[in-house]
Image (cartoon, rainbow, N blue to C red):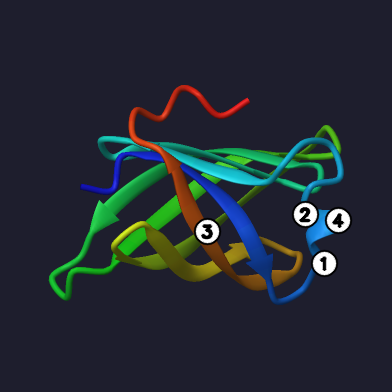
Amino acid sequence: MIEGTYEIIEMSEWDKKDIDLVEPGYIKIKGNRGYLHFICVDGDMDIRKDKSGSYRFSWDGNDECDPASGFGEFTCDGDTLTGKIYIHNGDDSSFVAKKISGNGSSFL
């Protein structure tokens, strides 16, 4: 089960201090919904499992209060998510996130 809160520990495009600029970067998942935060990016996620067992998502939110959206993909191996996030008309970055809680509500 992938539900829970995952701390983003690594991104290919940004250092950890940048990922955690406003607050620690994270991905929260409950069912097929989620929420992501890193740097000044926040977004609601719609998550779907594909036939290969990987997950694909679209997201919609903001980047420093400007509208932002995108899509991404990840795999889950135990308590680790490994994937890539794309920002429409912006950057894309691979990421690694480690699970820190089981219920998706007790991170911050």
Residue drawn where x is 28% and y is 40% of the image: 32
Badge 3 amino acid: Ala
Residue drawn where x is 58% and y is 68% of the image: 95
Q: Which badge, 4 or 3, is on the more N-terminal residue?
A: 4
Q: Which badge, 2 or 3, is on the more N-terminal residue?
A: 2
Determine contact: label 4, label 2, CB under 8 Å.
yes
Badge 4 amino acid: Lys
**Which residue in the protein does label 3 denote?**
97
Residue 51 vs residue 106: left or right? left
User: Which quadrant is the C terminus positioned in?
Assistant: top right
Task: Please provide percent x and percent y for residue 62.
Answer: 72, 38
Residue 57 vs residue 19: left or right? left
The numbered dot on residue 26 is none
**Which residue in the protein does label 1 denote?**
15
Residue drawn where x is 38% and y is 43% of the image: 46
The numbered dot on residue 19 is 2
Distance from the alpha carbon under mark 2 to that under mark 1: 6 Å
Q: Secondary structure at mark 4?
A: helix
Residue 28 vs residue 95: left or right? left
Badge 1 amino acid: Asp
Badge 2 amino acid: Ile
Distance from the alpha carbon under mark 1 to that under mark 4: 5 Å
